[in-house]
Image: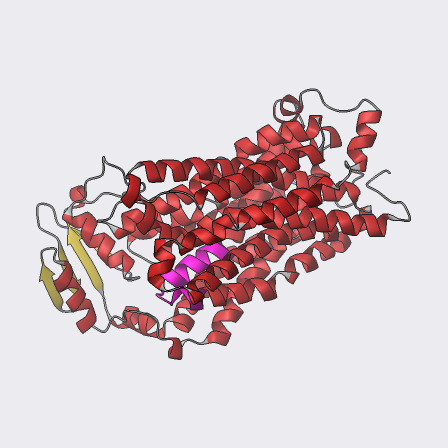
Amino acid sequence: MAGGATSENIGKEERFVIFASSLGTVFEWYDFFLYATLAPFFAALFFPPGNEMAALMSAFATYAAGFLVRPFGALVFGRIGDMAGRKYAFLVTIIVMGAATFAVGLLPTFASIGWWAPILLVTLRLLQGLALGGEYGGAATYVAEHSAPQRRGFTTSFIQMTATIGFFLALLIIGLCRIFMEAAVFTDWGWRLPFLVSLILLLFSVIIRLRLNESPVFQQMQSEGRASKNPLTESFLRYPNNKFAALALFGATAGQGVVWYTGQFYALFFIQITLKLDFLLAYALIGASLLFGSPMLIFFGWLSDRIGRLKIIMAGCLLAALCYFPLFNALTQAVNPDLAAFHKNQTITVSADATQCRLHIFVGPWSEFSDCDRAQDFVAKLGVSFTRQDTPGQPVSLSIGETRIEGWDAAKWQAAFTAAGLPARADPAKVDWIMAELILLAMLAFVGMVYGPIAAYLVELFPAKIRYSSMSLPYHIGNGWFGGMLPLLATAIVAATGNIYNGLWYPIGVALMTCITGMAFLHETKNVDISH
């Protein structure tokens, strides 16, 4: 069984392993991404009214909480997977994920129970993050250890595609609910349905996974007495395994994480929130890109079996870093040309005493909002780039070209923007749908390059007895911390600088760091024997 299962009957077994593992992982990603897709909507349901941008950032902070806890799930379930078996660990993770998601569908809102609503929501997001932290490493390791060596990149790429498919399903189910329900009905109780459906998916996934056998590599390792008694210590406190874990994070998964989330989630939020395209049309654009772009993950996984994993991942990070600014500028022109024209023709300046301007990342009872906070919130939520000018001791003012308005007054500011020609929404008749979709597919190509080969690469980088733990932690720090924090940090950068594109500096910087680190210190792994 060296290097993975190689018997004559592997074809049928391999297909079932891929199907069962991928199906359960799709449902886990679906559960996890429901909240991410509805984050802007949840801002109004679970956080106090009064400052829309602050509430949105609070919703993104809750979204990020699920990602921040993922590495701890990797440690907990990685240890279980390396000691008790791959199958057992990722059977538990799917039960935890499904139960937490179902519970979100039962939560009272802020209007009903006040601050207990966001507290309970964050708690359930943390449980989801813990479960997902254990799921990915188990599924990727399990599939790789069943695969023939010459197609390990191809088979594990199906696990990689599950995240994109889970996101697509979340968009599809939410979109159908919003199409067939009145807006008031969806706001009242209809948003709960996609979460409650997860109970059915949970039962189906558990039944499928109970039919799986333990991985052949783990069985062989146990029979030979090679299983680790303390996988966390061996993974992260002993050289050279700890060195490879650090290099895997900074030289592979951090850049992969930000490229994945920029090309899918940040693109969705940018189209919906900044470019003001109707949510159903935004779902349709992103959904189409996911549907047509998902096979690229399989292609690059397959290609990595032939030319190597590392060079494809590094090329994806580099191309993404070089192309994000022109692609997002082109996306603005394609989706909302009126907004692009407004930016070109008008100069916007918000003047205020800088000492009165604060950045509210998470709103709580402690939050106080100045006129500067309200003014910048107002302009930012319009999707408008503006220049900030410090005027110590002076009241807030707005300048649009030659027009100047003294003092903060929402009605007057809105009237000024309307008179200057700012579009309230993107006009569907003016959207260049083909160009917008091509731009999104270009970003999905970068996702395919970095994400398609990464599971096989991480599996091959670490020895079998500590593989689950060793690969899970850098993966979930890279994706959960570097990638999952992207919407929150990018939104904060935009709010702090006043430029709608400046949030892209975060993924660009991380992708370049990964490219430099990976090229300098990591090595190719595609011919490694993973049975040892």
Furthest-bottom residue in view? Answer: 429
Visible in this render: residue 236? Answer: yes
376 is higher (above) or lower (below) than 368 = below
| Quadrant showing the C terminus | top right
Residue 469 horizontal side relative to residue 144, left or right: left
Residue at left 53%, top 70%?
438
- Span shown in magenta: 262-282
**Residue 516 location (% of width, % of height):** 56, 45
Residue at left 32%, top 74%?
338
432 is higher (above) or lower (below) than 417 = below
Residue at left 79%, top 43%?
146
Quarter location, residue 500: bottom left
Residue at left 53%, top 55%?
167
- Asked if the magenta segment contains residue 276, the reply would be yes
- Asked if the magenta segment contains residue 47, the reply would be no
Residue toward you, 88 or 162: 88
**Residue 163 location (% of width, % of height):** 58, 51
Q: Decide whether the magenta segment is chiefly helix, strand or loop.
A: helix
